[in-house]
Structures are given as C-alpha cells and as structure tokens.
Image (spheres, coloured by chain):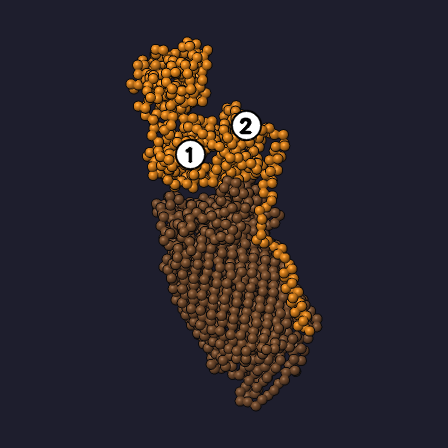
Chain colours: A brown, B orange
Amino acid sequence: MKESFTIVLFGLFSVVSTVAQETVVKGSVIDGITYEPLPNVTITIEETLQTSQTDVEGKFSFTTNVPLGEQILKVEKSGYVTKRFPIIVNEGEALDINDMMLDINVADSVDMYTITLSDDELNDDSTGGADNISGLLQSSQDVYQRTVAFEFSASFFNIRGLDSENASVLINGIEMNKQFNGRPQWNNWGGLNDMFRNQELSSNLSPSNYTFGGALGSNNTSTRASEYRKGGRITYSLSDRSYTNRVIGSYATGLMKGGWTVAAAVGKRWGEEGYQDATFYDSNSFFASIEKKINDQHSINFTGIYAPNRRGKSSPNTQEIYNLKGIKYNEYWGNQDGEKRNSRVKEVNEPILMLNHYWDITNKTTLQTNLGYQFGKTVNSRLDYPGGANPSAAYYQKLPSYALAEAKGPDYAKAYHLEQQFLKDGQIDWSRIYDANITNNISGLNAAYVLYEDRNDDSQLTANTILTSDISDHITINASLNYGGLKSENFAQIKDLLGATGLLNVDSFDNIQYDLIKPNRIVGEGDRFRYNYNLHAQVISGFAQAQFKYNKVDFFGALSISNTNYQREGLYQHEIYADNSLGNGAKLSFMGFGVKGGLTYKISGKHLVDFNLAYISKAPSLRNTYSNSRENHNVVKNITEEKIMSVDGSYIFRSPIVKAKFTGYYSKIEDANKISFYYADGLSSFEISENQTSAFVQEILQGIDKINFGAEFGIEAQVTPSIKLKGVASLGQFTYANNPNLYLTSSSFTKSNGIDFGKAELKNYKLASGPQTAYSIGFEYRDPDYWWFGATSNFFNNTYIDINPLTRTRNFYTDADGLPFNDYDPEVARHLLKQEKFDDYMIVNLVGGKSWRINTYFVGFFASINNILDVAHKTGGFEQGRNANYRTLKADASNEIPVFGSKYWYGRGATYFLNCYVRF
Amino acid sequence: MIKTKTLLAFLTIIAMNFAISSCVQDDDFKVPDSISSEENKGLEDLLTSGATEITMADLKSKFAGNDQIAFLVDTDIYIKGYVSSSDRAGNFFKEIFLQNSPINPTDGIKIIINQVDTYNQYNLGREVYIKMKGLFIGEERVGNGVLTIGGTIETNQFGTAIKRLTENQRTQQMFRSATTAELEPLHLTFSQVSGNHIGLYVQFADVEFVDYLAGKRYFDPAQDFDTLRQLQSCSGTIGYSNFTLETSSFASFKDDLLPTGNGTITGVVTKTFDGSKLVIGLSEVSDARMTGSRCEPSKFEDFEVVFKEDFESARANSTLNFARWTNFNEAGKVKWKEKNGDGNGYAEFSSFNSWDSSNIAWLITPGFDMDAQSKVLLNFKAAQHHVVSPNNTLEVMVSIDYDGTNVLDAKWISVEASLPSQHHPWFQFVDSGLIDLSSYSGTLHVAFKVTGSGTIDSLGGGFQIDDLLILAVN
C-alpha cells in the first residue's frame, strides 16, 4: 500500500523543467492531512548526503553540486514517517517537486518516550550526581542516541560518562543551563511535550548554528509560533511511574490574518504516589507563543512558559533498610491524619519569558536577537530538629545493625526490638513532632521541630544575538554575542512551625549565632533564618564558527570566549565567620576559551568517516566555586577554570537497509572541583575544637582530573518494510586520572581555612557515572494497518559506587598524632577500600500501540511496560562519610550488618504507561 | 467551523485542568486533632484496669525488702510522679527523674529509657504514670543508691544492673496525663541533703562557687565525662559548708563561665556515676541564679562560748569518764571510749570486738541552761571509720527532760546535723554545721547515740566525736 501511495504521490508532482545553467533540485513539503506547509523538514540527497531544511513555507532547494541521474531524496521530520522519493536529475535543469506529503507517524514514538522520560527522571535531585541526558537526545534520529535516550536513561547511563552540564540546552537560542550547577532544569518546561518538538540536536562535538556547546553538544528548541503544525491535540495518560494522570491540550492557529500566529498549550500531571512510597506529583503547565510577522524580513515572537511543579522526594537507603522494607521504601514520609505526608518536597516554579526578533537580512543571512527573563524559585523542604531527636525512623540508631554493633558484643534482644519497631512503623511520626512542639509551648520553649525550605530564588536576564550567513554555497558563518546576568537569592525559610510558637535562629548543636546582627532572634512561619545570601553572576561570551561543505568533505572550525564574574553578598553575619560572611565578598573572574573543529570525509554515499576535536576551558559552576556559601565568602583554594579536551572519530555505514555507526572517543577533564557536605566521624586532627573526632564538614576536592574513553556502536536494519532490528553497544572506562588535593572546612575547626589532608589517592578509581558498559537489542514491528509493537532487551554492567574521597587520604591511616595506627594492615586496608561494583542486570521493555484516522481526526493509544521481568537493580549509590578512618571503617565492616553501610538507589521494577490522544 | 470546535475543545481542557482540584498532598497541614490520643487511651486503660497505685516509698521498700537486688515487677501496680529533670540542655541523658509530688516532695525515682530529647515529651512538672508490671526496679550501677526503673537487666561481676526501657516498652508502660504541674523546689541547705532527696527538684539559697573557680567553666575539658564543681554556703555554719554541682560533657552550657556571685541554684539531687557522692545537676543553666554579692562566713570570734569540750584530756582507750557527761550502754556491754591519736583527744564508740549481737551506746553532754541566752547554737565534729552500712548509725538528739541518770525515761528529739556517712573517708572529721537550739528552753542535754553490732560484720564501724561547742550570739 505504501509503495503505491508513493507512486501516486510521484505522479502528482508537477515536474517542471526550466531552461537554466544550474542544476537545481527544489520543492516543498506539506502535511498529508492538513495540507499546511511543513517547516524544519530535513531533505537529504542520499548519494552525497547533502542536506537542506525546509523554511517556514515548507520550501527547500539544492543548488550546488547536485548529483545527476537517478537519485533518492529522503524526506524526514521528527514525528512524521520518513519517506524516500526517487527522482531523476538532469544536468542544467531545475527539478521542482512541490507539495511532497509527509504523514504523521502514528506510532509517534518520540512522544511516547518524551512523556515517560522527560517528565520522570529528568533532573531528579534524589538521584545524586547521576542526572539524566534523555531530554537532550530525544529528537535524535541516530539509533545509538535514541537507545540511550529511551532505553538506557532510566538506568542513569551517561553518554561518554559525562554529566548534562556538558551539554548546552537552548530555547530559541537562549542557554537554559543554570549557573549554579551548569545543568538544565528540565522541570521548567515539563508537561509541554507538544510544544517542544522543534528541536535541533548537535551531538557531541558536531557544530551547532546557535552555540559553541559543550563536550556533549547542544540542543536548541524553537518555540516560534509559525513553526507549529496548525491544529490541536488532546492527550491523556495513565501511569504508575512518577505520576498517575496526565492531561495535555495544545493548539496552534497557523498563520492568520495580519501576520499573527498563536500557539498555546495547557497541561496537568498529578498523582498521589509514584513508584516509591509517598512520592506525590503535582504539576501544571502553561505555554503561549505569539508571533507577529511584520514583513518578509522581520518577525517578532513572544513566548511565555510557566510550569510549576511539586513532587515528593524519595530517599537513598542502605541495603539493610531495603532488605527489611523493600525497594519502594522512602524514609521521608509519615502518616498525618490518614494522609501520607512527605517532609521533603521539591518545588520548581520558574516562569520563562522570551522575546525573539527574527530578521532575514538577505535570503542568505539571518540575525536572531533574543531577550529572555526567567525568575521564580526552587524549593526543597526538609525537617529540622533543633530541639528533638532525629525524626527519621531510618536513623542509624533505630536500626538492628546498631544493636548488633555494640562495643561489648551484639545485643540480639535489642536488635530484635528495633527490627520489629522498624518493620511495624518505620516512618516519620508526625504526631510525636507536633506533640513535642506543643509540649514545649507548655514550658515556654521554642520549637523542637520545624519544617523549613531551602530556597533558591533566581532571576536571570539573558540577551543575545545570533548571526547565520551562507556566504557562499559552501561556506556558512555563525556568530553570536551573549550576555547573562543572574541574581540568586539563597536562604532558608520556615514553612511550618508544626504547632510551635517560634524558632530560635541559633545553631542548636553548638549555640552559634547564625546572624550576629540580630542575635537570638525568634523566627516564625515565612521568616528567613539560618542562612541568607545572594550570589551574583555575569557572563559575557562570544562565539564564531565557519562550516564548509563540499562533495567529498565537510569541515568546520569554531571558537568561543567567555568572561564570567561571581560575587557573594552575605546578608547574615555568622558568629564563627564574623569577618568573612557579611556584605560583598571578593569579586571572582574567570576567562573561558573554547576551540573545536571537525571533518567528515565521504568515501562514498555508503561509507563515511568523521573526526572531531575540542578543547574547552570554562568557569567552574557556582556550586563548585564557593566551598561553604551558606556561612562565609570562602572560595575553593587555588580555583581555576575547568578544562575539557575531547576527541572522537567515527565510521558510518548507510545503505537503504542497514545504518550503522561506530565511534571511538577520548575525553580528559582537568582542574575540576567537587564540594560535598556531610557529618564525618573518625577525623584525626588536633585542629578540631576540644579534640573531637567528628564534625559537620565541607569536603573540598580540588584539581580533579578524569579520563573517559570508550566506544559506541549502533546498528539498525529495516529487514522487511515492517520489521526493524536494532542493536547498540556502549563500552566505556571512566576513571579518576590523578590524586587531587582534599581539604575540609567546618565551623567546628579551630582554623577557618580548614584542615588540609593532602592528596586523595583516587587515581584509577572508577567514576560513579552510571553503567560504564551497556548493550541493547530490539526490534520494531509496524503493521500497515497502523498498529505496531516493539521490544528491547538491555544489559548493564560496570556500574560503580561513588567513593568517599576522605577515606583515601592520610586521615584514613593516621592517628591524631600524625603517625599511622599501630594496628594498620595494608592488606586489610586494600580490601576495605575496594570500590563496590554493582551487579549486572537486564531490563526488558515492551511497547505497542494503534491509531485510527476518522475524517480529519487522528485517534491513537499506546502502552509501554518497562522492566517487565521486574528485575531489582541498583542504579547508583555512595559511601557514607561517617567512617573516615581505618579503625572505624574496619570496625563497621566487621559487623554482621554495617551501621554506616553505603546508600543506594534502586531502579524501578515493572511499571506501565498508557497514553491516548486525539489530533485534529 | 473547525476553529470554533477546537476553541471549545481547548476551553474544555482548561476547565478540566482546574476542575481537578488538587487531590495530591498540598502545603496545608493543620495541627492534627489526634495528638496523644493513643497515649490517653493507654492511661485510661491503666487506670481502669484494676491495677493498684503504690507510692514511690512503697517501691523503695520493695527494693530494700529484696536485699537491694534488682527484680522484675510481676504485679499489677503503677506509680505516679512528676518530672523533676529536663534533658533539654543535654545535662541528663536518656534518664528522667520523677518525684512524688509537685510541692514538698518526699521521694524521687529515676527511670531510664532509650530516648534522647525526652524534655519535649516528658516536660518538667508533667504528671507521668508508670505501669510497673513487666519493668525492673534496681540500680543502674549496683550499689550506687539511686533507685531506678528499667526495662531489662544485665548481670556482671558487680551484680545485676538495670538497663533502659526500649522504645516499645516506653510507649506501652509510660503514660502522660494532660497535667503539667508547677514544681515548687524543695528548699534545702547543704547539710540537710541526704540520699532521700535523690530525684527531687531542690533549691539551695545563698550559695556560691568556691573562690578558686572564678573564671572557670561548668565543664573542665581535662575530664572525660562529668565535671564536679564545689559550691559553698555561709549560712548555718562557722566557716563554709559545701556541696557539689555535677555537669556532663554533653551539656550545652558546658563552656559557659561559672557565675561568680551568690544566689540560688535549683536542680535535681543525684549521685556521681559511682554513687560515692551526692550532687546536684542542672536542667538549665539559667537555674543557677548567682548574681548577688558573695557572702562572708561566720567566724568563731562572732560567738560567745558557753561550753566547750575538745577531749584533749582524753586518756587513750579508757572508758569515757568526763565530769557531768553520761556514758550509757543501752544494749551490749561496751561503752563510749576516750581516745587520743596524733596528739588529738576525742570520744569514740565502736562495736568491733564487742561480741555483742546488738550495741546501743549513748554519750550525753552536761545540761545547759537555755534561758540564759536568746540564741544558742550547737556545733561539733564527727568522723567515722569502717562504717559500711546505713544501718550502722550515729544519731544526734536533744532532751529537755533528761534527769541526768535515766536515759531511757527522757524524751529525745532528733536534730539535723551534717554527719559522716559511709561514703566519707575514714577518720575525717565532718563539721556538723551550726545547729540552732534556740527554740528549746530549760536545761538541755545533747546525746550522741550509736547503733551497731559486734557479731554482724557490716555493723561494726566506729564513730568519733570531737570539739563540741555550745555557742551564744554576743
């Protein structure tokens, strides 16, 4: 049927030959249902791999080096069924193929996965360092990248072992990565999938027309109203993953009278509980884009995005806890009046406003000028217990291991009691918390417990201008200038006094004043307390690039330069850091520099090779610059720009049936920093107040080098018109490449510049960046009657725990006098410090769906089941910082169950997702 | 046409979105109504279960009746008490003291539980009921003299010690009522404090830290756990009388400077870890209100000596025979003896080697005319050696109807005096304090009565008396 359809289409083409010197292939593409022109369709001449994009009117053209004779024109656009049209090109003639029709991909797999993933694990803090890259890759056409996005990301697989801070995420040319940690905050546009389809991905080191990008490349989403397909869509989804229900409605008007185009969407996602206990979900999404076409050269577009999102977080747990309570256990909640109340709620509420000016200076040169403003808040709530016992039922002293580890031998009776207690309840006792505060009211005392929020209120203004010019048929020039200004207010705020009358703004642990300006202040609901400071950041950057495209070879070169300034402004005067906390801190300045280049050599239409090389130096993120910004102005000692050097080379094979790509890569990161906060036990130093051995510390690991190298392989074969087979392999090795310096700071230390522990022996330890090896095999069956299904089997191994660097320093083996412990045994130490590698696992996913066309409506549904075999698997974890030396670690390791064992995240068991939609 | 439909559909979607009222957790949680309802029910069940309330004194005698060995309570009894300590400042750890009454308490007891920050549940003055069945009564450290309720026991080479209630036991056995009483601290002087005051919320007035502690802190960093700081008082003595404040290394006020003034200190009477010494512990550092000017102790010169006996004429080891004194053996054949050691003479009674099964020996002073002066004070020094049992006693009594001969016919009234206990070092003379006898008239005799045994080893200790003075204010 499909073939005959193509022939009919072919027959309809109005093939017009005009008398001309040039050999030209041009035409236009329209939607098969609405007959509206389709922009951003990629047209490829398969033999030479020349590509062109359709413009707003759906038009495209090839004017240079057009191959002659029988050719195949491939027409593809995300969300549509790819078509291949045979054409005949005659020398000196212009071939004009108008109104090629593209049909919507009924399987709509892009949508399917963007729903299940981008809403879901993206940017979930509870997964520690293993953030998710799938949002970046979902528009990719490459089988390897699609597999990473849709099959691997739930396992916190990282492409090339690199974090998402190595990818620039842009909306309308404006970079959305946060200054705080360099990562995009996907929640800010969650639930608006219909409006985030016009994406352009430049993966890894390949060039982008908008930005220099990072080592993982860049992704630009356009929300320009005129680029949306005219029509609407209503979607309803049901799932047991992070939310239960989702409703989205969207509509785009297409170009209306007076040059106006409007696109809008509304979405809601909600659920009482996700996969983990008490992880509720509550999100609304609003989107509007309005474009006014002033004339053929100028167009102005306004976009507003508002996607407030609240969700209950879940805890990482020790194996002891998982064994007792299962992998859905979450320590953060407890019952209150019959409801599961989660103490740790994350709320993201950061509206985005954008104004974009599109100027077609000539038909070869465009200038896009953008103004963006984003403001709002990111909120993480938690319980504080200045006058009460730790409210967590999973606190180590409440678990059986604690009784079994007693110094005079295991106390089995107590362990049994604790186990029963934990099994019976094991959650926060909100009644007790309220009772404690009410009891304190009787005694005229302040709150024993409060629920407070760590708030981060950013307002970011961005302005930039991006020039694109095709200065000849072979050469395209891109350039941009960018300014970004950020004011980030950071403070803690009382959310709920939980029945108390007030809270004393003093550190209850050691009676230190958080703010000497107003000592002993009593704070109430809505008041700021504990810490209060602003961070200011300004970034000015420029980018220039030249891309060259010829018959046999394409190559490009790009440069970027940036200047970044940071300054901390303290609003509280901390008692311990009285001279170093209030007012403006020193102004920091970093110069970033990037250079990259690449070359693609087309041996033939079937065989290509591709090489890229990049060197990027950039300012460290705010998070890795200030070592303890809540309390003082301190900056990581000897701070400098972070550097990444990256190379890759690929061999690409393309035939009408088989597409395959093999890539080798090598990246080296230098001078990275990492700051961690934890309670350390077993410190050895005379520099701690009163010779204590434990303290709440900031751990600063500075000058970290890492080497990530490996190979990527992806193959897909269309073995019959309806059956496609897929295979992907990723083999990597991601390691620390040096022994970085480690020092600790703490308000409990006698010296404010901390204790230097010298080198941390990290070299050759594995990085905790998800599975370092992953494989996937799968197939898709697409029936001509618009139903389809697919299955994949995915294998993961070489996933490692995040090690605790402090135990790899001299602190591990030296006693307080600086000499090694007299019972130190290097053999035992080696065993204790061996990095844990998680078990291999296999995840099988199924997906299938069907759709119908009723007049001008499309109705469809699909369902997916992930991890159908319900395999319990660890996706990540970290060593606790408690046992910082040989003796304490050895003592704990020799316990039947360690008291301070590593904490883990488990992936989900079997889950489902159902989706149905109507398009019109 | 299509536009209208789509617009309608779109509006429907928006309406749907907002019609779905937030069915997920919102921010708006109120103080729950059900707070402590479970506990109230537990208390109600206990009070209606037919269990018998017994007093703390009863509980103490049960322990004494079990030869001071820890035991499990297996009868349906409960006690009621009022919380007299607070761990808010960290000076008490996993322990709560209870007293039997908010005012004028007479008995206290300790309960040890596996819980920190108990203050925000068992707040000072809270009425607490303890269902005793299933709990243990004994001592946390065998022989320390602090009667304690625990959840289990552990036996080691010292005997059977009490251990903490588990979380589960606590919720099943300890119930609060809604009452929080205002505690009126028991006003005591240092010389009055005895083991009977353990667990009570007491107050000492007109006290100060000893002179050399000026500039020192509550906690001495050279100590590992607890720091003892000496208090002194000028009232009721010639010179100073003393007592001890104990502070834990976990107290939040451990680094505060000791107050240098004179004033009141309010806290709980307890004992040092080894049980060797009575001390006071603070719940809050603000309970030490010592901001007045320091006191001047009374000096000997301030008084007129009405009578003085320093026993310097004593002949070693002879039966005491001083003019006008009475030396009477109520039981047994031995009497008070004259002693002389290192040039110091004194009187002593000991049952050791008497081979009498019971010894009761009286030493009675000459009579004094109480009507000659308006204010008359008694002062003496006493010491002990080999005293190991609280039943081996020295008592101080007075009589105004003693005829000089018939000891047992007279009415003897006990007077409070600071006396050496078994915990004092041997042969160390303890000042009795100034004992005010002004309320007596006529002819008054003072008696020292020792009870012991020559056949029971634990009752064979010796008591010594020296430097007896009857003073009058000039």
Same-subunit check for callouts 1 and 2: yes
Tell me if A121 is positioned left or right of B245 in this view: right
- B265 over B405 or under it: above or below: below
Q: Which chain carries label 2?
A: B
* Chain at tag 1: B
For disc 1, the marked residue is B265
Residue A783 showing in the rendered view? no
Residue at the extreme top of the image, as rendered: B405
Q: In this view, does A252 lie to the left or right of B461?
A: right
**Label 1 neighbour load within 10 Å: few <14, some 14-19, many 20+:** many
Which residue position holds label 2?
B55
Q: Which residue is drawn at 53% across and 50% down?
A: A496
The C terminus of chain B lies in which quarter of the figure? top left
Amino acid carrying mark 1 in the image: Ile
Name the element at disc 2.
loop
Q: Which of marks 1 and 2 is nearer the N terminus?
A: 2
Examine the image and state in which quarter residue B220 appears.
top left
- For marks 1 and 2, give the CA distance: 28 Å
